[in-house]
Amino acid sequence: MGAGRYLVGYGALCLLMVSFVCSGAQKVDVSGNWEGEIQTYGAKSLQKSIALSLEQAADGKVKGQVFYEDDGCIFAVEGQISAPGNNTPARVDLLEKGALTGVSDGCQHQRITYALGLTPTGNKLKVEGSHLSQLINPEKSFLTRQPENRFSERLKLIETVTSEDKRKPKQWSGAMNTTLLRFLFPAGYASPNHVYVYADQLTVRGYGKCKSSLYSQDGAGSDLKYISDDPECDILPAGHFDISAEDNLKITWRPKAIDAREVVLADQDISLVHQQVLTGEMWHLQDVYNKHGDSHTLSQIASKLLVARQNAYQRFNDIFAMQFPASKYSPEFIGSWEGFIRFSDGKKPDENIEQAALALWSAKSNDRSYILGYLTISEACFYSVYMQDKNGVAMLHGFEQLKRRCSSDLFNFEFPKQPIMSMDTSNTLLRIGPEVRPEGRKGIKQFQAVFHRAKPTPYLMSLLESDQGQSFALPDEVTKALMIAGKVPDENLEKQHDQRMRESAELLAKKAEQIRIQEAEAKQREWARLKKESEYRTAARQSKSGERAYASKPVGDPMPLPKVRGPFDGIPGATFLNAVYQGDRSVVQRINRSYTGKQAAGLKAFFGSYGNKMTDAMADLYKQVRIEDSVAAKYLFEYEKHYRRCLSESPAVFYVTGYQPDMVVTNLLGAEIARHYGGTTKTKYQVNSEFSDVFRQVGKMQPEGVAANITGFLASQSGEDLRKLSLNGVAQMFSKFSCDSPEVKTFEKNLIALF
């Protein structure tokens, strides 16, 4: 990768680049490979790894790739170095030009960071901008230059992705005279003269009579071949397109007639050609090409497409002409469907027809009346949907409160207000929409859909395997198997449902018995507590002098807390965290004795005359507390969340099981108004193997549990609690220090040594 130099300073270069402020010689060069972390603002801040491979030209233009490896995405970027001002340094502004990875590569985002600002600070680059709509904190987001060998795998991946991207289908549109041309390159820019062209006739009032006239050109120099049926809509003259697509996409019309002139339709940098997702007839044409490209010519494939689309329109008419049973809400809608939707938005009278797939499932094992689903369009995007039982009639609606993944620039389509669903008697054909379609009414948004049962399409299956950020339950394995088999829900599904209902009833009965036992035990404990408190009060009244003598007993003079300086100064609990970092066990033990002595004294002071020997026992028990136990538990429980990239390839795995008791809420009259069932939770944690022994010792602790917080509050009497401060300090360590920084590595080594 060439490394161009960009100089901003005095001399000839400064005279040539008059738009730049020449205030002292300054050299800026961002060519090469960069790696680091970014962190966003806010309570739900993100901390992500990021890498850039950049190439800088002599005129200050920068281009390259950005790797968002936590999200599985690679984007092409381009930008320019801006001149420094009187009080501002030079800065590189980069824009995302396009994704080099897609859903099939594990990248779920069409855009991550619209713009990035990189400011050189010493040997680092400070990062500004946004990440997934959250502002980046530039004071905690830096990149450092990396050697070539550290990026070798990424650069190989770029070569592979670029090569694959060149073979992916592309499209381009432009105008020639009074004709709108839409190009489809089914084999990508790898074979640019292997092309389909749709031609739309334009008039002063919009589209003319001829729309979507289809042509094919099979190779360089080959004349266009008209494919559509209507001979009157062969609107392009004889000739061919000369197309090159190396660094620039250049499209030139070469007419066959001697007296006609050539026309250059396009001549622009390929990286600046915006690629939208294929939809409608473009998607359908590409789909037919993918199935028959190895065995048919372009014109033969196009002919198959025309037949397929005519059949799709005819299928709509046939199915909506059929007599379906009454549209009754039923669990038999559950399953996987494939077909087409057709719609118009009122402004464009021509109907759009799109490939579609639909998956429906019961969201609750004990309630078959709650059916959710996904509706995908052209294997490009999806809507979240649900079925509604409206007076026994089945209707389909979109989840408006959930984020729609089909944007308006892809499909100008909205769910109608009354989308009636109905099936044929065999439950294998499904139609959605009014039985009688309004004709000739301007501004009416029309919508119909027809489906047949089929196994999920690849895109639909990828949604069923991943929650895609939605907040509702996905189908269980039994329902997924039903979808893959393309079967109608039968009595086996009914039996499984009934079994779940029985299991649910048995579980409720067990829960009710557990609640009864727990309530009885709680009443017994409350009675015992009241009895003991009464005994304490009686004893207090009978021996006031003895109590005064006992109360005057010194509770001890805890040794003063030492001040320990180190890299963690400025964050909560710095004294203890610095002591661990320094690795002096005696200082750590001294801090523990000072802390527990002070807390024990606080407990005795709080309970006062009610303390007696019981308070002494509690205080003595408190002296067994070690702050490092809580710190280690907090650090290991949250390590994977914050420091995932530093996990080894084969980390140690632990499972921690917890129990959440049931809770009953009553009103002032004692009547139950709500019940929340508890249960067990099983949480998976991963830590590096060197922490295995430590995790076994502290893995069952609750460093920030309710009991620990209440006891700490009573002991500290609203003062500072060093243990809690240290836990807060660990939380700030995650955000302020990188997992592979010398400070963190030393802290970890000496923390392990304390166990």
Image (tube, helix red, strand yellow):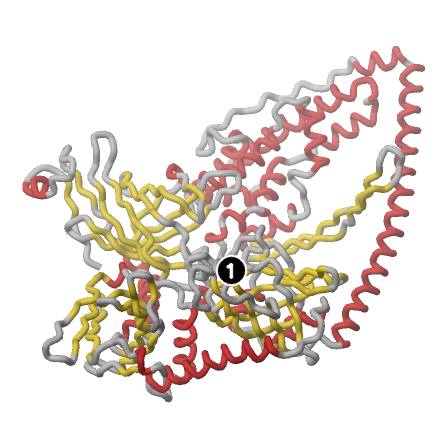
The residue beneath circle 1 is 444
Residue at left offset 81%, top offset 68%: 498
Q: Is residue 71 left or right of residue 65?
A: right
Residue sticking out furthest to the left? 12
Is residue 31 visible in the rendered structure shown here? yes
The answer to whether 185 appears left or right of 733 in the picture is left
Which image quadrant for residue 107? bottom left
| Residue 147 picture location, percent across and down | 28, 55
**Residue 344 appears at what percent x and percent y?**
48, 64
Amino acid, disc 1: Ile
User: In the picture provided, is 724 more to the left or to the right than 393?
Assistant: left
| Figure quadrant of residue 753 | top right
Label 1: few (<14), some (14–19) or many (≥20) C-alpha neighbours in 10 Å: some
Name the foreground residue: 318 vs 50: 318
Identify the residue at horizontal 26%, vertical 50% (top origin). 79
- Which quarter of the rendering shows the N terminus? bottom left
Q: Secondary structure at mark 1?
A: loop
Residue 718, horizontal then vertical, whole percent: 66, 22
Foreground residue, 90 or 566? 90
Residue 73 vertical position relative to residue 315 in the rendered view, above or below:
above
Can residue 649 be seen in the rendering of this structure?
Answer: no
